[in-house]
Structures are given as structure tokens and as C-alpha cells.
Image (spheres, rainbow, N blue to C red):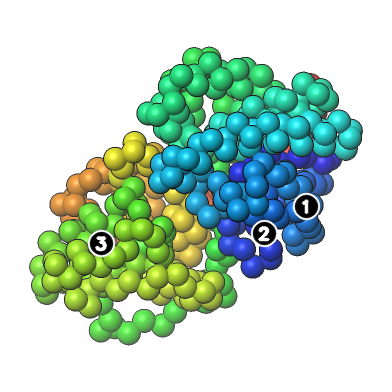
Amino acid sequence: MKVLYLVSAYARDPEDVITPWLVETIRRLRTRGVEAEVLAPSYRGLATQTVEGVRVHRFRYAPRPWETLTHDQTAPDRIRERPAFLSLVPGYVAAGSLAAARLARTGEFAAIHAFWPLPHGVIGLAAKRASGVPLVSTFFGVELTWMEKELPFLSPVLRRIVRGSDAVTAISSYTAERLRRQVPGADPAIIPFGATVEPSAFATAGVPRDADAPFELLFVGRLVERKGVHLLLDALASLPPDRRVVLRVVGDGPDRARLQARAEELGLGGRAVFHGFVSKDELQLRMAECDCFVLPAVVDSKGDTEGLGVVLLEAMSYGKPTIASAAGGIVDIVRDGRNGFLVPPGDATALAGAIGRMMDDPEGARRMGMNGRDDVRTGFSWDVIVGRLAEVYDSVRRR
């Protein structure tokens, strides 16, 4: 079975780290007899190519210098920063629709799968009308927030996409509920995406720890408001000085300078270490060495929050206990008291309390880490995820 994926961005070469979960999804689907080809926008004139065995069809939608609506950052963020980029959207949708219809009419594809259905659902509907090939639409959450907050006049388009799709999926119960709120009667299947950081050999063997080493917290992610790292710094500063704890922050983003200045202002010193982007090997080592993984997500000023929190799955696959906010799709992953602690979003005091409880109960922390590893295997493993996707494709093809 061959499926055409409609996406906003895809790896431009084997070293490109963009959308790693999508690359991994396609790779894993091959074991289920599903071959995917990708239709994605061009980037500065980039032509159709093959990336690690995956055929990536590129459609041109603007003069070469302007083809940066996607890939460098999300299209909504790009448009917020430079409103002139909004003028590219009609050409993007028109060019994408023509390209998708042309590919769908070849008769090679059993299904079309649109990710981020605003606007790719419109492109998918054009392809479906041109060919009769069934359409699957997958929602993540951020596009629903953007529409609800800034583009409410597109509600009829959203309803048309959902009702014109042969199957609809959402990455979390949070996203599914938001979709139902905007499109009454929608019944999406919940299919998350999986971890892309594979546990290395020492994840199961264990990393020898110095008995005198401080308790190590780890955060991995883009340094933006909705990740809540500012709250984590406040929580850390509120812990008594005799609490031997260090926070390692892995990742970069527009808030990094502000967060580092905040850490200095709070007098955290060596208690908060910013590593920036790191290699895959170093990330694996950080995951294996930490005592607890933390994701204190919040609902940001744009109304965005975590659609799922896949980095939590990566930490759990290493057998690590977690502390996270009860925000967005995180509640699908972290089960309070079983594989970690959930705290109210935006509550630095509760976050500090959870860190203290984790430090005071090493046996409980170890047990939660093992429970988390089991939960990933049973509910979020790639076998489970690609199995559900293959079932959806087979269902719409038969229908």
C-alpha cells in the first residue's frame, strides 16, 4: 500500500533534523507494508528529491528568495513575525492543491494523509476530488489554537475538512477535545507519535553515579514561553540551599538569553546549566544520567500549550521518572503517582514541592521510572503507533 503524505516541512537532506518523528513514522511504516511518499513545499527553490529512500515531491509557491514560509520555523510563527508572509498563503494552497491532485491522479496511492489540516486539508480535499483517493486528516492542536484565536472566520473551512475526510486522527485527547469543541460531531481516533531518541546501550545497563553527586534534573526542548522553563528556574531558586540539585537545560530558542539572565538574577549559579543544542550521543548520555525529567509546560500568551509532549516518552523509555504540568496532551502520558508527578500549570511552588518529593523518595522514583518504561511499551511504542496508522489506511481503502 502506498500513501501520499501532505506536510508543511520535511527533511531537506539526511542531516536535517526537522520533523524527526515524521521521518521515523515513515521508516517504521515500511515494516507494515506501507510505503509513504511526501508532498512538501519547496524551500528556496528546492526541487523534488529522494531523502534516505523517501520520495519527497516539492511544490514551488513563490520566487526562490521568498520560499521560507516553512522549514526554518512554523508558518504561524513566521507570519506573526513578518505579516507580509501571509500573502504567500493563497499561492501555497493553490500550488499544493495542483501538485497533490496531479500525484493523486496517477493511481499509485491508496490514501492521502494530510498533517496540519489547516491548510493541508484543503490541499487534500482538492486531491480527493480530482482522484477519488480517500483522505486522512491529522490534527496536532496548535493549528486549532491559531484558528480559534486569530482566524475564527475559517471555522466553515475546518468543518468542511473534517466532514470531507474519510478518517480523522488527533495526537492526544486534549487535541481531540479541542477539535470536538470546534466541529461538533467530530470523532477523531487518538494516535500519538513516538519517541525519536532511542535508548542507548547504557540506558538499560545504567550509568554509574557518584554517591556525592547532586540530584540531576533534565529539561530538553525549545526555549519558548509554553515550555515553562522560567517556572522551573523559580522553583529551583525556592528550594533550600542545602538541597543538592542541578538542572541541565538542553535546547535553544528565542527565550534562551532571557532565561539565562533570569537564572543569574535568581543566584542559581551552577544549579542551572544551559547546554544549548547537543549531539545525539550527548543527548542520550544526558537522558541516561539524569535522575528526573521535567516538563513544566504552560498555556502561553498565544493560547498554545503542549499537544502531546513526546520528549516525556523519550525520557520514560530510559526508565526516568517525570515531573510535568497537567497541561495539554501531557495528561495522556504522565499518570500522577505512577510514572511521575503532575502539577498545576504555572505553579512554581507545586513544582518545587514535586522536586522535593522526588528527591526524598529514591525508591519511589525508581519505581515510577520503571512504570514509565512499561507504559511507553504498551501505549506509545512505535509498534503500537504504526499498527494503528496501518489500520486506518486499510479501513479507508476498503471503505
Amino acid on which disc 1 is placed = Thr
Crowding near pointer 3: few (<14 within 10 Å), some, many (20+)?
A: few
Q: Residue at 17% across / 59% down in the picture? A: 234
Instruction: Measuring from the top left, give residue 112's x and y in whole percent.
Output: 74, 34
Q: Position of 322 compared to 99: left or right? A: left
Q: Earlier in the sequence, mark 1 or mark 2?
A: 2
| Spatial CA span between label 3 and label 1 | 40 Å
In the image: residue 134, left or right of residue 81: right
In depth, the one of 311 and 11 nearer the eye is 11
Q: Residue furthest right?
A: 107
Answer with the quarter of the image where residue 220 lies.
bottom left
190 or 118, which lies in front? 118
Give the distance between the C-alpha atoms of the residues marked 3 and 2, in whole angstroms.
31 Å
Q: Is residue 389 visible?
A: no
Instruction: State whether residue 197 is above or below residue 101.
Output: below
Q: Can you tell which mark lies on residue 12? A: 2
The residue indicated by pointer 1 is 48
Q: Residue at x 65, y 52 (%)?
A: 64
Residue sitting nearer the eye, 32 or 169: 169
Position of the C terminus by quadrant: top right
Quarter of the image that includes the N terminus = top right
In the picture, the disc for residue 396 is: none
SS at mark 3? helix
Tell me how many marks there are: 3
Image height of 52 relative to 92, above or below: below
Whether the residues at callouts 1 and 2 have beta carbons within 8 Å, the answer is no
Q: Which residue is mark 3?
A: 258
Q: Amino acid at mark 3?
A: Arg
Q: Earlier in the sequence, mark 3 or mark 1?
A: 1
In the image, residue 138 above or below residue 324: above
